[in-house]
Amino acid sequence: MVKQPIVFKEFYNKDRDLPEPLWGGEVEEADIQCPTCGSADMCYSAHPNDPEEIFPSTVRCRSCGRITDYYEAFKQKQHHPTNTPREVVGGQDEVPA
């Protein structure tokens, strides 16, 4: 079975007329992994109006752009780790360095 590539998720709240969370600082713990694509390159989400206000329970994948709960990303690494993240298409140029 061939897995389809994941499309980079740029907007989460666009259809709800809510502000988009900002990209926060990089998550330095090595014990989390994106449940969607399997990447370990994660960063925190920040408040849309104040980048200094970090949401510690919410992380965002730099590869596919998905926002997920920190606990869910932790459980992914513990129970379903992968060394081969899925391919992500589109939007990578918009990910902050």
Image (cartoon, rainbow, N blue to C red):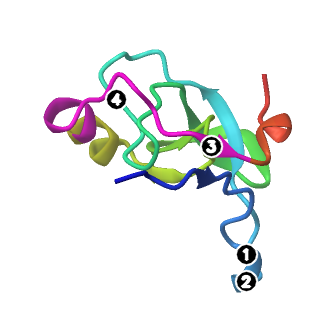
Q: What are the residue bounds of the magenta stretch?
A: 76-89
Residue flagged by tag 4: what amino acid is it?
A: Ile
Q: Is residue 90 left or right of residue 81?
A: right
Task: Compute the Cα span from label 4 to label 2.
Answer: 29 Å
Residue 10 drawn above or below residue 80 = below
In primary-sequence order, the first of circles 4 and 1 is 1
Q: Which residue is mark 2?
A: 15
Q: CA distance from mark 1 to mark 2?
A: 8 Å
Where is residue 21? Give x, y as percent.
69, 54
The residue where tag 3 is placed is 88
Is tag 2's residue or tag 3's residue first in the polypeptide sequence?
2
Identify the secondary structure beneath mark 1.
Answer: loop
What residue is shown with label 4?
32
In reply to whether residue 80 is colored magenta, the answer given is: yes
Query: Is residue 8 placed above or below 26 in the rendered structure?
Result: below
Q: Quadrant of the C terminus?
A: top right
Q: Marks 1 and 3, how far apart in space?
A: 25 Å
Dot 3 crowding, Cα within 10 Å, few <14, some 14–19, many 20+: some
The spot of residue 96 in percent (x, y) is: 79, 30
Q: Upstream in the sequence, badge 4 or badge 2?
A: 2
Give the residue furthest to the right: 93
Closer to the eye: label 1 or 3? 3
